[in-house]
Amino acid sequence: MDRLKNFTLLIIIVSVMVLNYSVYGTANSVNINSPDEKIRLNIFVYCNGQIGYKVNYQDIPVIEKSFLGLVVENVSLGDGVDLVNTESYVINESYPWRGIHSTAVNHCNGASITVNHRETAKQYNIDARVFNDGIAFCYNVPGKGDRVVSGETTSFVVPEGSTVWYHDFYMHYEGAHDRKNIADAKAGEWAAPPLTVKLPNNIGYASISESAIINFSGMGLQADGHRGFNVRLGHEVPASYPYVLRYGEENAKRLAVPATINGPIKTPWRVILIGPDLNTLFNSDIIHNLSPTADKKLFPEGFDAEWLKPGRAVWGYLTDEPRTLEGMKELSRLAGELGFEYHIVEGHWQRWSVEDRKDLIEYSRENNVKILLWKHSRDLRDPDKFHEFFKHIHELGAAGSKIDFFDHEAKEIIDLYKACLREAAKYKLIIDFHGANKPAGESRTWPNEMTREGIRGFEMRGPWARHNTTLPFTRMLAGHADYTVLHFGDRRCETSETHQIASSLILQSPMLVFAEHPKNLLNHKAVDLIKQIPSVWDETIVLPMSEIGEIAAFARRIGDKWFLAVMNGPQARFAKIDLSFLGDGDYKAMLLRDEKGNSTSVSLVRKRQTFGPKPGVIIDNTTVKNNESLFIELVAGGGFVAVFSQ
């Protein structure tokens, strides 16, 4: 009988181990596996009592032994700890999404790990989740009253031999990414997330960022000179050049103060995207999966509400159109002719009378175009002006606002983003943030965030070929980006017209803002294709030929129509593109390629690069099948675009 009891007990123990294999461990060590068991997160306590973690992909290091921890009221909660309890859970759901694909998948194994701080005997929680394409964790510290969060001891140690891409905070989130061997990342260097990693020996890729920045400051990264990057909270990151220029050093010093948080402390999620290829990284849903769902009272229909419709926009900032009422009416008229849904009007509207403002909005509405009105964020830091502004543009009939010049990630500024989105939602207004930080899944919580800048786009100067082929696999891994795409003038620098058209298909945003004058779009030989370019997609495939900073090749589907877009980097090349992503049967194909024969000349004028002339566009029409391939000769800085329909 005793033997039978023991045998039965053994069966129960083994069954429990099998059922909970995704989360297991020993004293002071917890392992969490991804649903497909290819990724493993190990959270453990070092011999000295410091809490740490590491991440493996198919048993190969992605993040080597690194530290965890938060500093609250000058107490380092990552030092002198024990893991005292672990509760596992599974999430498996899908939901409608807007952007790179129409359905998001949220499937992970998770664990809530209770940590005991020996010195204070206080306990807090680490929530960790492991997906098939990455991992995430955050800290939850219970408590009441005001407490100061002065720092975080989280770090990310990258394997030797890795290549990394990042830029510093000089222009906040509008820098150009440097490519470095991890050994060349010097101590003290700053990195604005996402930080993308190509792992050694062609293992795959990773990218470090964050999600759900709520009642907290944003995260910067700082290199330690030993292959590690340490988390720095918003107040610790040096104020960017734009912020100091616009607000002065005194305001910058004021924001360089640790955040005080009332009540329980919940940090943003620290996120590491992981995959064998760039397609996996680009299609990851992790960042928005971790963000809270939208308030049903404010967004009862979710993305389907009429006032939240995505679309294309004209924008007069880089055109020669007069900044007058009549000039803006002309842009709206042309937007309607293109079939574009929006027109973003810069700050000159504030000099007009209320009657003129209403006149533009009504005229635009007659052309099936909605208006967004620009506003400086400093005007919204006064509570009276804040409420007055949103009420006013609602009464005018505007669709929303482009709010500019945040340029900081201190908690105070993060709180302002949320306040703007909440107030705008009350009036059914959409928002485009400029001078902004990287997105962190906000549009799942606030579907009225249609886009945000936080990217080096056409407001700046080139060169562009390497930059544009880097962005999809660095900055855009965080989410939508208002690059203000496509320009046919000198501002395009060393890139071709076809490269520019391809950029509007690859550097996409739910509100896709075009930099070129709409009359030049209408007069371009590729106008019939340009009119078809959507701002959201049902499906996206990053093609295997893509390489960060060298070439970006995307196949994207909307309904039953497929688009193929290629942006080439600084080196000419031949490319073979397999059309197996198409369905069965014959497809009509419109192909855009670069003319050959015109060389690119480069000169330096006052330290600014000017380029020209560049090849034009050749359009071919043909029929293709999914068992065929295209062979393309790409010029340096060139591109290729195709649209396939049945």
Image (cartoon, rainbow, N blue to C red):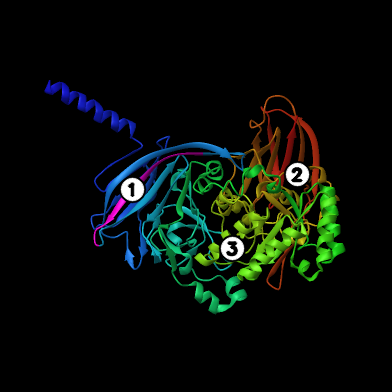
121 and 347: which is toward the camera:
121
Spatial separation of the CA atoms under disc 3 and disc 2: 30 Å
Number of the label disc, if any, that sits on residue 593: 2
- Which of discs 2 and 1 lies nearer the camera? The answer is 1
235 and 378: which is toward the camera:
378
**Earlier along the polypeptide chain: callout 2 or callout 1?**
1
x, y percentage for residue 182? 44, 57
Disc 2 packing (10 Å; few <14; some 14–19; many ≥20): many
Q: Is residue 282 visible?
A: yes
For residue 426, side relative to residue 367 (left or right): left
For residue 44, side relative to residue 438 (left or right): left
Q: Amino acid at mark 3?
A: Gly
Q: Amino acid at mark 1?
A: Ile
Q: Is residue 294 magenta?
A: no
**Earlier along the polypeptide chain: callout 3 or callout 2?**
3
Q: Which residues are magenta?
A: 106-119
x, y percentage for residue 285? 53, 43
Total numbered labels: 3
Number of the label disc, if any, that sits on residue 113: 1
Spatial separation of the CA atoms under disc 2 and disc 1: 55 Å
